[in-house]
Amino acid sequence: MPDIGVRELKTRASAIVRSLREQRTRYVVTYRGRPIGVLLPLDETIPAELSSVPAAATAWDVLTQLGQEISQGWSSPLTSTEILSNMRR
């Protein structure tokens, strides 16, 4: 997969989209030389971590469940917010 910087992506957007569509090229988008994203044709298989709403909803459900489990075993008279505030002082 070729790397493409944000500035180059901006200036060559039409050619890059054409390459995605016609040649099925995939790109790693970089910002200041560090990878920040991937451009790939949509009809290719998308890994679960890149799919949009279902994975995000599932992740949120897992976090909610973990929060409930933690709250059941919470023994401190202080809330987590109060503990964090005290730690920052």
Image (cartoon, grey):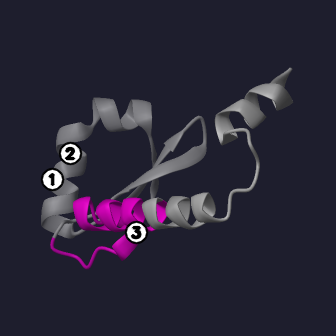
Identity, as a three-letter code, of the amino acid under mark 1: Arg
Q: Is residue 89 visible?
A: yes
Disc assigned to residue 49:
3
Query: Which comes sooner in the sequence, label 3 or label 2?
Result: 2
Relative image position of residue 49 (x, y in whole percent): 40, 68
Magenta-drawn segment:
43-63
Give yes or no for residue 20 being in the magenta stretch. no
Left or right side of 76 for 55: left
Mark 2 crowd level (few <14, some 14–19, many ≥20, 10 Å Cα): few
Relative to 31, residue 35 above or below: below
Mark 3 element type: helix
CA gap between label 3 and label 1 equals 26 Å
Give yes or no for residue 61 being in the magenta stretch. yes
Q: Are marks 3 and 1 in contact (CB under 8 Å)?
A: no
Relative image position of residue 36 (x, y in whole percent): 50, 47
Q: Looking at the image, which residue is at 22% across and 76% down?
A: 44
- Circle 2 sits on which residue? 15
Q: Looking at the image, which residue is at 25% across and 67% down?
A: 54
Mark 3 crowd level (few <14, some 14–19, many ≥20, 10 Å Cα): few
- Circle 1 sits on which residue? 18
Q: Are marks 1 and 2 in contact (CB under 8 Å)?
A: yes
CA gap between label 3 and label 2 equals 28 Å
